[in-house]
Image: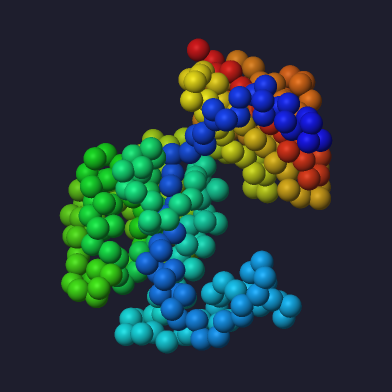
Amino acid sequence: MFGNANRMQSEGSFTGLRRDAKVLLLANRQYDRLEAASVLLSFPGDFLETPSGFSEYANPLTISEETLGFDAPVQLEKSKAFGAYFEALPQVADFVISDTDLDPARWGERRIIVLPTLDYLDEKTQQSLVDFVAGGGCAAVGPKLPELDSLMNPCTILKDAVESSQGKWFVVKDGDDAASVLDQACTAAEVDAVRKSDARLDVVVHADLADEERRVVFVANPTAEAIEARVELPFEADKATELWSGQPGTVQGSQLLASMPAYSINVYDCSLKS
């Protein structure tokens, strides 16, 4: 298996591939720091798990539920908001994950920034979001529009921009609405979704930095059942070759068809239709 994997990576020039995802989901490190500071009892251990089963990481079992002067405990609410985005995004678009410590200069590689926001947000981050949207990007934030900066001083840069209705702003006020709001954001930003016949499938598209007419598509079936997969890709392909086996894949325009055994991964080298 390892020999085949090495061959596939070498012959397929995988080092020149990059995720062809237009959506960037950011974890909010400012809220993560509050979460870490709110831990009431820690369990130091090896490899993040102690013999008792408790994790070294902060989690709802060990975090204070105090509101700390906010309407609700930000240290707990932040995980709910991020989780809602994380669960909803696979239904509407391919995406990559980073955090608010990522240099905003790199946001320009994407069309949509998705960021959980609550009562406060660093002034620089607020301004970076406003600049991103002003430059033609799209942003999905919420469930709250912050009115404070990270030092708890009044700061409504983001709130004022969203309420001005200028630019492509989308607010997810409730986790149940995340999928529909994010779908609207993708439509506004002209981000084509990867549609799957079965929601249990995982599909990831990579672009070749040296060849604009090439895409490499990973299709994974992480379940114990075989799945007849039909994947609607954001491009039309002339042909596809499954790199593990070397066999031709079945493509019909923008649709990729595959019989996926349980716990299997297919990797397709696709040539775009000119």
- Relative to 75, does residue 102 appear above or below in the rendering? above
Q: Residue at x 79, y 25 (%)?
A: 245
Look at the image and tell me in which quarter the N terminus lies: top right
Say left or right for 179 vs 71: right
Q: Toward which corner of the image does residue 62 lie, by quadrant? A: bottom right
- Numbered-mark total: 0
Q: Position of residue 93 (x, y in %)?
A: 50, 43
Nearer to me, 120 or 230: 120
Q: Toward which corner of the image does residue 228 lie, by quadrant? A: top right
Q: Toward which corner of the image does residue 198 lie, by quadrant? A: top right
Say left or right for 94 vs 107: right
- Relative to 131, does residue 81 appear above or below in the rendering? below
Q: Residue at x 44, y 68 (%)?
A: 32
Say left or right for 67 vs 270: left
Nearer to me, 119 or 209: 209
Q: Is residue 255 visible?
A: no
Can you name the residue that lies furthest to the top here?
A: 274
Q: Residue at x 22, y 44 (%)?
A: 134
What colour scheme was applied to this rendering of the protein? rainbow
Q: Is residue 60 visible?
A: yes
Q: Residue at x 52, y 62 (%)?
A: 83
Nearer to me, 59 or 178: 59
Q: Position of residue 272 (x, y in %)?
A: 54, 18
Nearer to me, 106 or 118: 106
Q: Position of residue 202 (x, y in %)?
A: 64, 44
Q: Position of residue 45 (x, y in %)?
A: 65, 75
